[in-house]
Image (cartoon, rainbow, N blue to C red):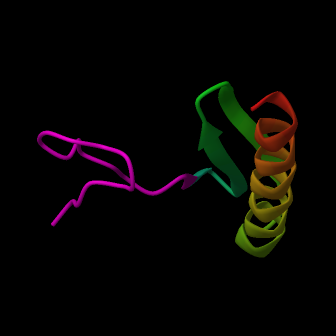
Amino acid sequence: MNENREGESGPAPFRSGRMFSIGTDWYFATREGDRGPFRTREEATAELALYMRNKATEDKRMG
């Protein structure tokens, strides 16, 4: 079941996971586009965490 995030109203949109693989390569999806390839899911997950941290810092500076 999808739930609204803080600050959202109305029906919650469908959300899916960010991680996906093509062959043996791993990627993660962002609003700006897909990132990868990474050799392992763990490597992609670590890069996603770094990306999200950097994005949050950037958003704080812009806001």
**What is the magenta segment's predominant secondary structure?**
loop
From the viewer's side, name the closer residue of 25 and 45: 45
From the viewer's side, name the closer residue of 53 and 27: 53
21 in relation to 1, above or below: above
From the viewer's side, name the closer residue of 59 and 50: 59
In the rendered image, residue 28 lying in the magenta stretch gets the answer no
Q: Residue reaching furthest top?
A: 32
Instruction: Identify the image quadrant of the C terminus.
Output: top right
Q: What range is drawn magenta here?
A: 1-19
Instruction: Identify the image quadrant of the N terminus.
Output: bottom left
Give residue 11's position: percent from left, percent from top: 12, 42
Q: Quadrant of residue 47?
A: bottom right
Give residue 35's position: percent from left, percent from top: 75, 39
Q: Left of 28 or right of it: where is 17?
A: left
Q: Left of 16 or right of it: where is 17?
A: right
Q: Quadrant of residue 17?
A: bottom left
Give the residue displayed 39% in from the left and 55% down from the top: 6
Give the residue displayed 31% in from the left and 43% down from the top: 8
